[in-house]
Structures are given as structure tokens and as C-alpha cells.
Image (cartoon, rainbow, N blue to C red):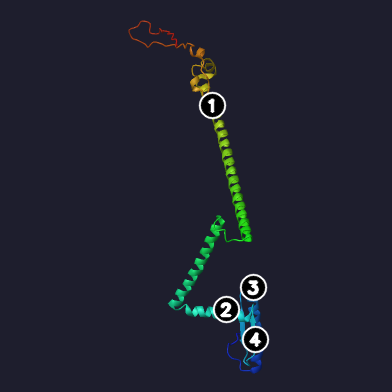
Amino acid sequence: MGRGKIVIRRIDNTTSRQVTFSKRRNGLLKKARELAILCDAEVGVVIFSSTGKLYDFASSSMSKVIERYDKLKEETDQSASPMAELKYWQREAAILRQQLQHLQENHRQMMGEELSGLSIKELRNLENQLEMSLRGVRTKKDQVLMEEVRELNRKGNLLHQENLELHKKENLFKQENMELYKKVYGTRDANNINGAHASLLPNRPSNDEDAQVPIHLQLSQPHHQNCETSSKTTNLGLQLH
């Protein structure tokens, strides 16, 4: 069976009350120490017993913790008034103006201006900072150039592959065109009148001698009712120049 819930109220028995105080005090201080270590928190615990005895724990210094608490407590109390908020923002603006002035001074020194008030050590430190900055800029520039070169090489390889694919498609088209030409004219006619139809084949020069080969066509006359010899045919010889 689990433990029953303890009623949170004052313990009447003095001995029991003292024992409970001792146990819970040690547990509270242990938890405060663990919280400070694990969470990197600034913790301060102050305990007064019923007899007026003091028990305390501070992660850094009790006086420092109390001073910080008083300061934040005062700012919290004053933040409720408009004048306190106005003073707070005025302090923040003054801090920002100082930071801006310091940054502008550093920028002018980086640009080689207003160096008259600097000592040898300060000038040497400034020179080292400039050299480190210049080294970083050059490193970044070389990195960007290398990336651009790699990108150009990649695009060049892609173009080369596309060019090879186009050559393959061109050769395949030539083969298909040749096969189609052979199917239409036949193998023997393709060899005889290859020059006459050279324009059908890509990248094939024309032949003048083959272009002058005569083509013989045989025509038959249509049937007429008034002709005595209806089965007579006429052979015509046509020569193409």
C-alpha cells in the first residue's frame, strides 16, 4: 500500500515538529544546491527555525544574492510609474548611443582614418585585425571561385552528354531514313537511281550521272467502242533529262 497523504498543518508535538523541520530543511538545501549546479542558477535560501536559529545556502555569495534581489525588487516597484519607465528607456538610449559611437570609431580606424591618437601597440593590434580580415576575405573568394568552376564543369559535362545524345539520334534518323528509302524503291532501284533522289537522304552528295538515267514508262491506251483492234496497246518511251 502507498503512503497516505500528509495533512499540511502545524505539528503540535514538539519532538515530531523538530524532526520534520530537520529532515525537510536538509532536503530543501539539497534541492537548492542541485538547482544551482544543474541549471547554472544563482540561488539563495534563508531559513529561520522556530527557535530563531539561522540556516542559509547561497550558490555564490549571500550578500551578492541579497543585493541583486534588492536592486531588481526596486526596479520592479518603480516600473509601475511612467517616470520610472521613461528613465529606463533613457538609460537604454544612452547605452546604445555609446555603442554606436564606439562602432563608428572602430570603422574609421579600420578605414585608416583617425589613427593619430593610437599607440604602437594599438596600431599593431589594428594591423593584425586587418590581416585576419583580409585573409578571411581571400579564403571566401577562393571558395566562391572554386564553386563556380565546379558548376561550370558540371554544366559542360551535361552539354557534352546532350551533344552525344543528339549525335546518336541523328545516326538513328539516318538509318531509319535509309531503311524507309529501301522499302519504297527497293534495293536494286535504290542502287540505280540513288543519285536522282539523293536529296531524300541527309548529308549525301548528289550524282549528276545518275540524275540523267532515263526512266521508261509503259502506258496502255484506254478501250474505245469505234476501234477495230480494242486490245492494241501503245508503248511510249519517255526520257527525263
Mark 1 or mark 4, earlier in chain: 4
Q: Which mark is residue 38?
A: 3
From the viewer's side, name the closer residue of 127 and 21: 127
Mark 2 or mark 3, earlier in chain: 3
Please, which residue is most extreme toward the front here? Answer: 116
* Residue picked out by circle 4: 55
Mark 3 or mark 4, earlier in chain: 3
Q: Residue at x 57, y 38 (%)?
A: 156
Quadrant of the rendered image containing residue 81? bottom left
* Residue picked out by circle 2: 68
Q: Which mark is residue 174?
A: 1
What quarter of the picture does the N terminus occupy?
bottom right
Q: Secondary structure at mark 4?
A: strand
* Amino acid identity at mark 3: Leu
**Whole-number angstrom distance, CA of label 2 to CA of label 3:** 21 Å
Mark 1 or mark 2, earlier in chain: 2
Q: Secondary structure at mark 1?
A: helix
Above or below for 69 versus 121? below
**Whole-number angstrom distance, CA of label 1 to CA of label 2:** 91 Å
Please, which residue is most extreme toward the left here? Answer: 226
Q: Give the foreground label among 1 and 4.
A: 4
**Whole-number angstrom distance, CA of label 1 to CA of label 4:** 101 Å
Above or below for 43 versus 234? below
